[in-house]
Image (cartoon, coloured by chain):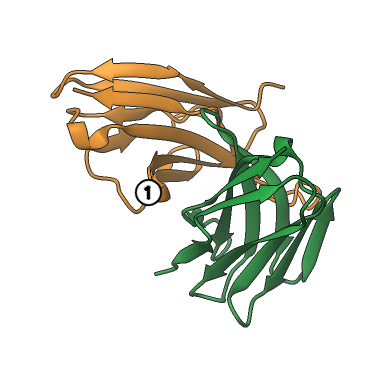
Amino acid sequence: NAGVTQTPKFQVLKTGQSMTLQCAQDMNHEYMSWYRQDPGMGLRLIHYSVGAGITDQGEVPNGYNVSRSTTEDFPHRLLSAAPSQTSVYFCASFSGTGLLSGNTIYFGEGSWLTVV
Amino acid sequence: KQEVTQIPAALSVPEGENLVLNCSFTDSAIYNLQWFRQDPGKGLTSLLLIQSSQREQTSGRLNASLDKSSGRSTLYIAASQPGDSATYLCAVRLSWGNMLTFGGGTRLMVKP
């Protein structure tokens, strides 16, 4: 059971480039989300999904795109990278059911992105 | 809009001390509250989750309490150890299916 797997761990992009951060979970969780973490600002929600085929915007969605074609995968795309998108990105998932799980949310290890 | 605040932002204590980390939130209609630990360069690890109907949860040396009416939660760490050094974050979920709103975290340093 791998949990939540994110790739890549580190990436340097030039302004204007695009890239996709991959996220996969093997726990059959319905809910998946992407956060960014910036110094002094905690984690902020970018996009989330409540199931395959359904996505919605969070607090800071501009400049990003997501899709959810399967339950397991939730790729996150930077459309045209800007220096303001330099951040640490976390993917997370949790189950909408399961009293035993207590709906605990599980995080990936993070992706460190630098835009120059 | 739900806002979550954690005080203090940083804390340094000698080993063995009991300590309390604070988390406050503006909207008391929460579904649950969760405390996380984050080590440098790592993701978040869930420590304790308190459902809205619960008052506290305990795991080993950790005890988390929840007072919905006052919009507060505390994380109590007993007999702190250098291995407890990390950033501790609290997060609340407002309703079923909504994602989490995080506080800014408390960076804890336990000195040997």
Question: Tag count in the figure?
Answer: 1
| Residue B49 higher or lower than B87, as above or below | below
Q: Which chain is orange?
A: A
Rendering coords of residue A52 (x, y %): 49, 37
Amino acid at pointer 1: Asp
Q: Colour of chain B?
A: green
Report the front residue among B45 and A19.
B45
Q: Residue at x 46, y 44 (%)?
A: A49
Looking at this view, name the residue that lies furthest to the right.
B60
Q: Residue at x 44, y 68 (%)?
A: B2
Rendering coords of residue A7 (x, y %): 46, 18
Looking at this view, name the residue that lies furthest to the left.
A16
Q: Residue at x 54, y 65 (%)?
A: B94
Q: Residue at x 17, y 31 (%)?
A: A82
**Which chain letter goes with mark 1?**
A
Tag 1's secondary structure? strand
Q: In this rendering, does residue A67 appear at all?
A: no
Looking at the rendering, in which quadrant would you find the C terminus of chain A? top left
Q: In this rendering, does residue B23 appear at all?
A: yes
Looking at the rendering, in which quadrant would you find the N terminus of chain A? top right
Instruction: Indicate left or right for B79 with A86 as reference.
Output: right
Instruction: Indicate left or right for A106 with B51 as reference.
Output: left
Instruction: Indicate left or right for B99 with B12 as reference.
Output: left
Rendering coords of residue A100 (x, y %): 81, 48
Asked where in the image residue B92 lies, by quadrant, the reply is bottom right
Asked where in the image residue B71 lies, by quadrant, the reply is bottom right
Tell me the residue that label 1 is attached to.
A56
